[in-house]
């Protein structure tokens, strides 16, 4: 009889932890999804970049999978605080999106990225555990705005015209804090007039992570970015904690004890 998962979430604490994180990212992004970027080491079987040393790495462990770290690790999420970004020379998303509206807001920012789960853990409670742990970090850091890139698989804009157009029509983030895809790679989200968008079909084509941000009250930046290294079409998601959906907020953010 298969055991139910027994989840534990913690931060990567040492070189071995970070290696396990990068191994899982390699398995998902490279072996499964076909990424082929400059930070990929096929000999070691890891996916890494220069931002990793400056980030916090949430690790989701399933303790029923044994006692070997790389077996237990089933999900990861990378978090870059403003302190980390200063040490790294900026935020990762700045290579794809103009973040000036966020930076000029003078509010506390946290960038989220490199999220992945083992295939058998998608669509269940695994991501909930990662988000709940992340909410604790958000509170500890005093963050006011969460943002980061999230991806559609593939680079065929025609094939993605339905979901991208729906994002443009219904989910643009407020203009004062709305980033924009960098000019030389800008792809408009507006691909179809509203009359030609099948809302149900479009929603089904939106990846689960993006839909999770939208349910929380998040929105998207102006334009998309084609990332040929990862074979993806990226959008920038922005979530203002102040205007977050209160029902969803209650699920993830625990009330402080009196």
Image (cartoon, rainbow, N blue to C red):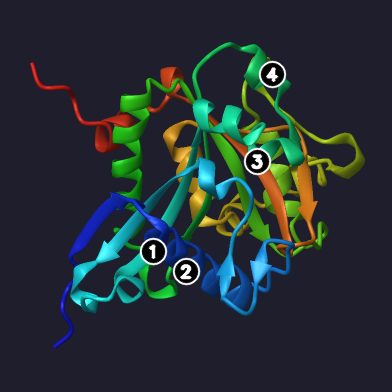
Mark closer to the chain start, 1 or 2: 1
Residue wearing tag 3: 92
Pick the front one: 70 or 163: 70
Q: In front: mark 3 or mark 1?
A: 1
Residue wearing tag 2: 24
Mark closer to the chain start, 3 or 2: 2
Element at badge 1?
Answer: helix
| Mark 1–mark 2 CB contact (< 8 Å) | no
Residue 207 % position (x, y) = 56, 56
Query: Which class describes the residues within 10 Å of circle 2: few (<14), some (14-19), or many (20+)?
Result: many
The residue lying at 51 percent from left, 63 percent from top is 22
Q: CA distance from mark 1 to mark 2?
A: 13 Å
| Mark 3–mark 1 CB contact (< 8 Å) | no
Q: CA distance from mark 3 to mark 2?
A: 20 Å
Residue 74 seen from this side: yes
Residue wearing tag 4: 101
Q: CA distance from mark 3 to mark 1?
A: 23 Å
Pick the front one: 39 or 191: 39
Q: CA distance from mark 4 to mark 1?
A: 37 Å
Element at badge 2?
Answer: helix
Q: In front: mark 3 or mark 4?
A: 3
Q: Is residue 238 above or below residue 6?
A: above
Element at badge 3?
Answer: helix
Mark closer to the chain start, 3 or 4: 3
The residue lying at 66 percent from left, 31 percent from top is 90
Residue 225 % position (x, y) = 78, 47
Residue 29 % position (x, y) = 59, 68
- The quadrant holding residue 39 is bottom right
Residue wearing tag 1: 16
Pick the front one: 187 or 143: 143
């Amino acid at each position: 009889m298969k055991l139910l998962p027994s989840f534990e979430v913690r931060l990567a604490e040492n070189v071995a932890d970070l290696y396990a994180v990068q191994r899982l990212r390699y398995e998902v992004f490279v072996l499964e999804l076909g990424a082929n970027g400059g930070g990929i080491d096929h000999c070691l079987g890891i996916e890494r970049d220069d931002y990793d040393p400056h980030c916090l790495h949430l690790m989701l462990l399933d303790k029923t999978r044994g006692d070997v770290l790389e077996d237990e690790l089933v999900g990861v999420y990378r978090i870059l605080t403003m302190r980390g970004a200063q040490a790294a020379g900026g935020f990762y998303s700045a290579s794809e999106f103009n973040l000036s509206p966020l930076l000029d807001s003078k509010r506390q920012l946290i960038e989220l990225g490199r999220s992945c789960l083992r295939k058998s853990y998608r669509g269940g409670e695994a991501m909930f555990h990662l988000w709940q742990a992340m909410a604790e970090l958000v509170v500890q850091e005093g963050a006011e705005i969460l943002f980061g890139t999230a991806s559609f698989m593939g680079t065929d804009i025609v094939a993605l015209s339905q979901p991208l157009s729906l994002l443009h029509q219904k989910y643009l983030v407020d203009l004062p804090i709305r980033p924009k895809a960098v000019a030389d790679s800008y792809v408009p989200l507006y691909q179809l007039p509203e009359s030609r968008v099948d809302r149900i079909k479009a929603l089904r084509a939106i990846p689960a992570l993006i839909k999770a941000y939208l349910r929380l009250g998040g929105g998207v930046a102006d334009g998309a970015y084609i990332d040929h290294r990862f074979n993806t079409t990226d959008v920038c998601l922005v979530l203002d904690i102040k205007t977050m959906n209160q029902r969803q907020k209650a699920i993830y953010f625990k009330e402080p004890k009196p």
